[in-house]
């Protein structure tokens, strides 16, 4: 008898559960809307209680539709939409304004309530409710962002979306060469990956600025281009001798940022290489950061900026794609005809210009079993060290001997640790 009673309770709770979730969704959205009204000290049509009832109405309508057919849901939604339109029209007449954002929000709350009826779509409803509330809550931030964004940045954002979401899905996912390495979609995916990393770094610099000093400039600038940071810091050191310690610190931090960036690219393309690469790249990162803090960290901040391009340009992205394909093919041919020595030579040459291309190329080859993982790890590390030597040369050529010598005190031990890690591996 007791077991039957408990079973009836379980059934009753399972029937009630979708409505409880619906109440929570309505309360979440309604709380944000009511807080907005209180902040503006204005009256509105829908607040906390209204949103809860709207979400419940959606769930109840879906429940009734499961009993009486889908036509009931269509009629219920049409009636509710008409009620919302009349209510907000009256609000516009009485209050002298139309809160169209809240009008759309109540319609979405009704639909989310309807989604709560099915266990298959309940989690989707919860996730969408959270996203809707976030969108409603970031009103001030969104307006501030629109005010500061430049036309060039908006266009570059659209370009970024085009290459990632429009062009990429249209490319064939098959190799086109006799060696089986030139896959158009994989090549374009690398273009998207590297462009996205640079884009995110640019956005972070635009948000935080450089008022916190050269250290944050180095760390954020390194996400976009550690070479650009080294070039800018060399010019600063040459023009203002007193900033050399801070410029050395920023250059080192930017260069050390390159190593985690390589690890991120490898993790996305070929996770099997991530752990083997972690030892040499993490070792160089730790040595560089620790020595920079011990030798050249200064507490005072110095205002400067890194001369970076717009977040994304199509021409450099296409050039990178071509270079990536070239390095991919050369690495494969070098591996076939010259073995490991040819792969290492290709990585050293490629590292002079761009470490991302050789990293992604070798990771791709290792993933398709066209290259041994150990050879790929060593070659990627060599490319990173070559690129570090390029930046060291920039500090001497574009900066001063003192600036270059101080950078060398950090970069040379970093390279030595990387070589040691390769031999140990």
Image (spheres, rainbow, N blue to C red):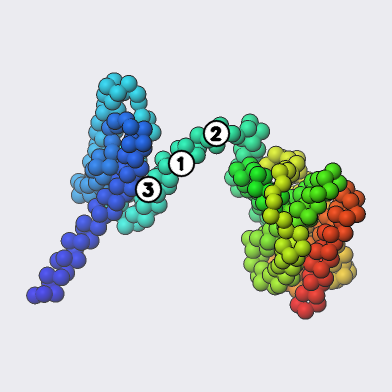
Instruction: Please state if 347 lies on the left or on the right of 8 as rendered.
Output: right
Disc 1 versus disc 2: distance between alpha carbons?
A: 12 Å
Residue 98 lies left or right of residue 400; in this view the side is left
Label 2: which secondary element: helix
Name of the residue lying farthest toward the left: 1
Residue for point 33% across, 36% down: 38
- Quick check: 10 left or right of 332? left
Q: Residue at x 79, y 49 (%)?
A: 243
Quarter-of-image position of residue 408: bottom right
Q: Give the CA distance from mark 3 to mark 1.
A: 14 Å
The residue tagged 2 is 146
- Residue beneath label 3, please? 129
Res 413 quadrant in image: bottom right
Task: Tell me the quadrant of the picture where the C terminus can be found.
Answer: bottom right
Number of residues whose C-alpha sits closer than 10 Å to that of mark 3, classed few (under 14), some (14–19) or many (20 or more):
many
- In the rendered image, which residue does mark 1 sit on? 138
The one nearer the camera, 411 or 197, is: 411
The relative height of residue 109 versus residue 226 in the rendered view (above or below) is: above
């Amino acid at each position: 008898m007791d077991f039957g009673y408990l079973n009836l309770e379980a059934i009753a709770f399972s029937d009630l559960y979708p409505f409880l979730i619906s109440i929570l969704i309505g309360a979440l959205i309604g709380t944000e809307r009511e807080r907005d009204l209180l902040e503006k000290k204005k009256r509105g049509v829908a607040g906390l209680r209204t949103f809860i009832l709207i979400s419940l109405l959606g769930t109840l309508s879906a429940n009734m539709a499961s009993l009486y057919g889908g036509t009931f849901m269509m009629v219920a939604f049409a009636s509710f939409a008409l009620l919302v339109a009349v209510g907000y029209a009256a609000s516009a007449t009485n209050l002298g304004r139309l809160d169209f954002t809240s009008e759309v929000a109540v319609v979405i709350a009704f639909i989310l309530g309807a989604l709560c009826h099915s266990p298959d779509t309940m989690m989707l409803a919860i996730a969408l409710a959270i996203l809707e509330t976030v969108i409603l809550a970031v009103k001030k931030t969104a307006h501030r962002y629109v005010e500061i964004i430049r036309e060039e940045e908006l266009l570059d954002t659209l370009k970024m979306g085009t290459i990632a979401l429009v062009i990429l899905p249209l490319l064939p996912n098959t190799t086109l060469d006799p060696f089986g390495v030139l896959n158009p979609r994989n090549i374009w995916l690398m273009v998207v990956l590297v462009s996205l990393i640079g884009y995110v770094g640019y956005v972070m610099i635009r948000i935080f600025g450089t008022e916190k000093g050269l250290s944050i400039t180095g760390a954020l600038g390194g996400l976009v281009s550690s070479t650009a940071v080294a070039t800018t810091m060399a010019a600063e050191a040459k023009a203002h001798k007193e900033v050399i310690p801070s410029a050395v610190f920023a250059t080192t931090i930017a260069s050390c940022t390159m190593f985690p960036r390589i690890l991120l690219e490898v993790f996305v393309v070929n996770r099997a290489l991530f752990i083997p690469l972690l030892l040499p790249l993490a070792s160089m990162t730790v040595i560089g950061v620790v020595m920079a803090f011990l030798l050249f960290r200064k507490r005072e901040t110095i205002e400067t900026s890194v001369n970076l391009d717009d977040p994304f340009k199509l021409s450099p992205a296409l050039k990178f794609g071509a270079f990536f394909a070239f390095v991919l093919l050369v690495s494969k041919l070098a591996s076939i005809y010259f073995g490991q020595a040819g792969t290492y030579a290709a990585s050293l040459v490629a590292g002079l210009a761009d470490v991302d291309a050789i990293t992604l190329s070798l990771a791709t080859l290792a993933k398709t079993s066209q290259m041994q993982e150990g050879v790929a790890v060593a070659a990627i590390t060599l490319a990173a060290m070559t690129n570090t030597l390029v930046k060291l040369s920039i500090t001497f050529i574009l900066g001063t001997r003192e600036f270059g010598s101080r950078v060398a005190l950090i970069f040379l031990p970093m390279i030595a640790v990387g070589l040691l890690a390769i031999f140990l591996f």
